[in-house]
Image (cartoon, rainbow, N blue to C red):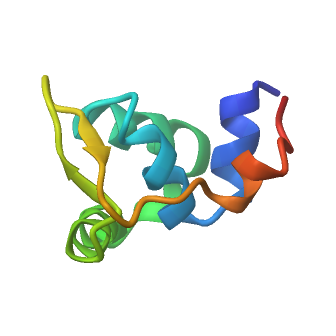
Amino acid sequence: MSTVEQIVKNEPLEEIVTVFALLKPHRQLDMLIRRHNRELIQHGELEKTYKNLFEAGILTGGEKGLCAKGPNWKAPKFVLEKRYT
């Protein structure tokens, strides 16, 4: 199992988006999550999560379809603990 697959299967959606939205545009992130954990975003949760993260100042608009770190961005627990290195 790949590292990305482990993260998508084991971590909360909000934490996944907090990290991967900086690296992948919305459409690619949607496909990535659907490939590894379809149930996580079955009912529009991805769009709601993006909206909540933008409103909370965790993410902000970036370049080329990517997000940027907002003023309230903090690394998720799984990143700080280096669970998947």
Instruction: List x then y, in percent, for residue 17.
Output: 44, 52
Instruction: List x then y, in percent, for residue 8.
Output: 63, 47
Q: Residue furthest front?
A: 71
- Residue 5 vs residue 50: left or right? right
Q: Nearer the viewer, residue 63 or 20?
A: 63
Q: Residue at x 27, y 73 (%)?
A: 48
Q: Residue at x 34, y 69 (%)?
A: 49
- Residue 58 vs residue 62: left or right? right
Q: Is residue 7 above or below residue 11?
A: above
Q: Nearer the viewer, residue 23 or 35?
A: 23
Q: Residue at x 21, y 75 (%)?
A: 55
- Residue 49 vs residue 81: left or right? left
* Quarter of the picture holding the N terminus: top right
Q: Residue at x 50, y 44 (%)?
A: 19
Q: Is residue 33 above or below residue 17?
A: above
- Residue 72 vs residue 84: left or right? left
* Quarter of the picture holding the C terminus: top right
Q: Nearer the viewer, residue 29 or 58?
A: 58
> For residue 64, which quarter of the picture?
top left
Q: Nearer the viewer, residue 42 or 28?
A: 28
Instruction: List x then y, in percent, for residue 66.
Output: 23, 33
> For residue 21, which quarter of the picture?
top left
Q: Is residue 40 above or below residue 61?
A: below
Instruction: List x then y, in percent, for residue 35.
Output: 52, 36
* Total count of labels: 0
